[in-house]
């Protein structure tokens, strides 16, 4: 999708800048980048597929779920959380910002 390509190109530019020494590890991402990440995650939710949602997370994720007391720190545990959470057909929405 166009959004996915925007995000991939943005991350590629950031990676190249870091390699060239033009960016620091702690550089903040832009609002547009944050919105792109949110939209990709929200689109993953819309598929209803927990594998697709879990793949949106880092290789070493830290998910503190809203409807569970158990932190999720690997692919399988994130997927397990979304197996049941996706039954509620969640969709996110940015209300402000």
Image (cartoon, rainbow, N blue to C red):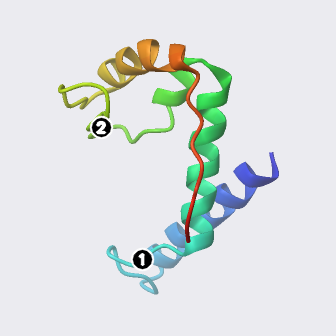
Q: Residue at x 41, y 19 (%)?
A: 79
Between marks 2 and 1, how big is the CA–CA gap?
Answer: 21 Å
In the foreground, 92 or 10: 92
Q: Quadrant of residue 91?
A: top right
In this figure, what is the number of numbered marks? 2
Q: Quadrant of residue 96?
A: bottom right
Q: Residue at x 42, y 77 (%)?
A: 28
Regarding mark 1 in the picture, which secondary structure is present there?
Answer: loop
Residue 6 percent coordinates (x, y): 72, 60
Regarding mark 2 in the picture, which secondary structure is present there?
Answer: loop
Residue 82 percent coordinates (x, y): 43, 21
Residue 34 percent coordinates (x, y): 54, 63
* Position of the N terminus by quadrant: top right
Farthest-out residue, right: 2
Residue 63 percent coordinates (x, y): 30, 37
Crowd tier of the residue under label 2, counting other residues whose Cα lies within 10 Å: few below 14, some 14–19, many 20 or above: some
* Position of the C terminus by quadrant: bottom right
Q: Which mark is residue 53?
A: none
In the foreground, 38 or 85: 85
Q: Residue at x 32, y 75 (%)?
A: 26
Q: Residue at x 44, y 20 (%)?
A: 85
Q: Is residue 13 visible?
A: no
Q: Is residue 62 visible?
A: yes
Farthest-out residue, front: 95
Q: Would residue 16 be found to the left or right of residue 19 on screen?
A: right
* Above/below status of 14 relative to 67: below
Camera-near label (2 vs 1) is 2
Q: Would residue 63 be found to the left or right of residue 88 on screen?
A: left
In the foreground, 67 or 32: 67
Badge 2 or badge 1: first in the primary sequence: 1
Q: Which mark is residue 63?
A: 2
Q: Which mark is residue 28?
A: 1
């Amino acid at each position: 999708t166009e959004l996915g390509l925007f995000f991939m190109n943005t991350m590629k530019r950031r990676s190249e800048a870091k390699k060239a020494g033009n960016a620091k590890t702690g550089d903040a991402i832009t609002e547009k980048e944050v919105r792109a990440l949110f939209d990709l995650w929200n689109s993953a939710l819309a598929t209803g597929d927990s594998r697709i949602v879990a793949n949106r997370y880092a290789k070493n994720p830290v998910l503190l779920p809203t409807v569970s007391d158990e932190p999720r720190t690997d692919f399988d545990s994130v997927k397990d959380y979304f197996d049941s959470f996706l039954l509620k057909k969640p969709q996110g929405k940015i209300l402000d910002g």
